[in-house]
Amino acid sequence: MKLKIDIIADNLMTIHPLLFRSLSKPLRSKSFSITPGGMFVLGSLKRNGILSMSDIGKCLSMPKPHVTVIVDKLIEEGYVERQHDPSDRRIVNVLITEKGLKDFEEIKLLVSENLKEKLHALNAEEQDLLLVSSQNVKELLSSILAKE
């Protein structure tokens, strides 16, 4: 018999792929050259402003070499820029460009609209259940992550 904690872990691990597939579909259907990883980096930069490569890695729980590959691609596409820290030239900061911000917001809107379309398939009772459930999951996960 599975323990409650095992079932919770299984459920949470199943949610990510389901959401990821649903959210990344609009990215693939348009001519944007931003990967889901790139969207996570742009989102971190939008929320936090200028970040070092290490800070981006910490925000996203990603190793620095992986962040570097994503950032290099975003630079190539004109979505972000590198900027040396004036107090320590060894530190390379990354900032989002106007193009990056514009396309990030456009993609976010596309993804949101796509998700809302899918949610309309639920009846009112299912929507209410998902509203409460998703809010609870968000709050509980935020609480767990705040303790790290």
Image: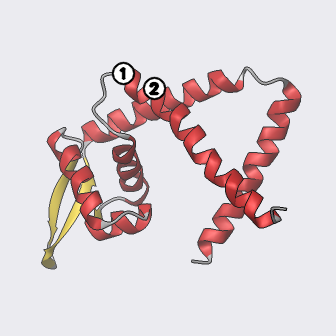
**Which of the 4 image quadrants contains residue 101?**
top left
Whole-percent x, y for residue 57 in the image: 35, 65
Instruction: Identify which residue is drawn at 84% across, 36% down.
Output: 128
In the image, is residue 140 above or below residue 130?
Answer: below
**Which of the 4 image quadrants contains residue 44?**
bottom left
As shown in the figure, which amino acid type bears the numbered disc 2? Pro
- The residue most toward the left is 89
- At numbered mark 2, what does the secondary structure look like: helix, strand or loop? helix
- The residue most toward the right is 125
Instruction: Identify which residue is drawn at 73% across, 20% down.
Output: 121
Whole-percent x, y for residue 32 in the image: 31, 28
User: What residue sits right under mark 2 in the picture?
Assistant: 26
Placement of the C terminus among the 4 image quadrants: bottom right
Instruction: Identify which residue is drawn at 64% across, 26% down.
Output: 116
Q: Crowdedness of circle 1 by 10 Å Cα count: few (<14), some, many (20+)?
A: few
Whole-percent x, y for residue 76 in the image: 15, 42
User: Do the residues under discs 1 and 2 have CB atoms within 8 angstroms?
Assistant: yes
Query: In the rendering, which numbered label is found on residue 30?
Result: 1
In the image, is residue 112 above or below residue 133?
Answer: above
**Which of the 4 image quadrants contains residue 60?**
bottom left
As shown in the figure, which amino acid type bears the numbered disc 1? Lys
- At numbered mark 1, what does the secondary structure look like: helix, strand or loop? loop
Q: How is the image coloured?
A: secondary structure
